[in-house]
Image (tube, rainbow, N blue to C red):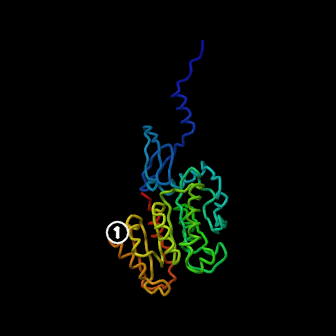
Amino acid sequence: MKPRSLPVFFLLWCLLASTSQSREWTSADGRKLEADFVSATDEAVTLKRAADGRSFTLPLQGLSAADQAWVKEERAKNAKPIEGPYASLLTGDWALSEDDGLPFALFGAKDLDASRKYPLVVALHGRSPNEENGKQLGPFSKSFAEAARYEKNPCIIFAPHGYQPFGGQGTAWNNEPGTKALALIEKLVESLPVDENRIYVVGYSMGGFGACHFAVTEPKRFAAVVAGAGCTGPDSADVFKRLPIWLFHAADDPTVDVKYSRDLAEALKRSETMKYTEYPTGGHGIAGTIFNDDALHEWIFQQKRE
């Protein structure tokens, strides 16, 4: 007698049963649930309830800290390695390189998953006669790589060097280095797992002017702008009526007149996408105050290009 073939649905059931990860889950408010882990994204997790087999998706933040950590570890086990140009620069530390004559630093965890998409933070430094790649790093770039913040918001950080004579002249980002940096952003997007809806440009002093210049030049490329102690004039306000921007300045800045930020803030006062913070003191040395504020990091990673 010829044996009968097992039904396809039964084979699938056996496969799922052998690979399921049934476990007890705990919600953030302490409730318990027995369910199989199905899949997860950066923001949500899909589970299959053991009691009735129903699948559902809930916010990752709705789980206990221990379960959130378990999900992260599970995703890491199945991470797909990143390959291609620039992949070797993702080391978990700042890597220095050069592209088309543009020196730059790049930061990204070495275990980033090629099957996911990550925000790209473009960090522009201020005026400087510095000729050494790597010395352009400051709070505007390093704060995003700080361990606790990076754990919460993994990303890729691109910090170009405004080489000489442009860096010393204060014209780097609206000149040759800026043009090359914008071109390299496109290469990074093509080669690395960058979320094109979450590309942010931040800068301080010359970098603040540069961040605004980048946004005005490529208004559809960026999801948010942070400009500290330097920004564009009010004639560019129309761009920022649609593009989230957070301006910072100290009232007693002796290097860059606070009028720059005040004028743009005034032109955008009816905009729901503009934030302006003015410190009464601090001079031209408020970069650390700006970029080491967790509120800024929370705000910027919430922004997505529409």
Residue position for label 1: 271
Percent x, y for residue 214? 50, 68
- State left or right for residue 273 relative to residue 89: left
Which quadrant does the N terminus fall into? top right
Percent x, y for residue 204? 51, 76
Above or below for 182 versus 55: below
Which quadrant does the C terminus fall into? bottom left
> Exactly how many numbered labels are in the figure?
1
Going 58% across and 80% down the picture, which residue do you hit?
A: 169
Going 46% across and 60% down the picture, which residue do you hit?
A: 220
Q: Pick whichever, 49 or 230, lies toward us.
A: 230
Q: Pick whichever, 51 or 56, lies toward us.
A: 56
Q: Residue furthest left?
A: 270
Amino acid at circle 1: Ser
Going 48% across and 87% down the picture, which residue do you hit?
A: 254
Percent x, y for residue 234? 39, 75
- State left or right for residue 42 relative to residue 273: right
Above or below for 198 versus 203: above
Q: Residue furthest top?
A: 1
Q: Pick whichever, 244 or 10, lies toward us.
A: 244
Going 43% across and 80% down the picture, which residue do you hit?
A: 260
Mark 1 falls on what kind of element? loop
Q: Around disc 1, counting alpha carbons within 10 Å, would you say few (fewer than 14), some (14 to 19), or many (20 or more)?
A: some
Percent x, y for residue 226? 47, 71
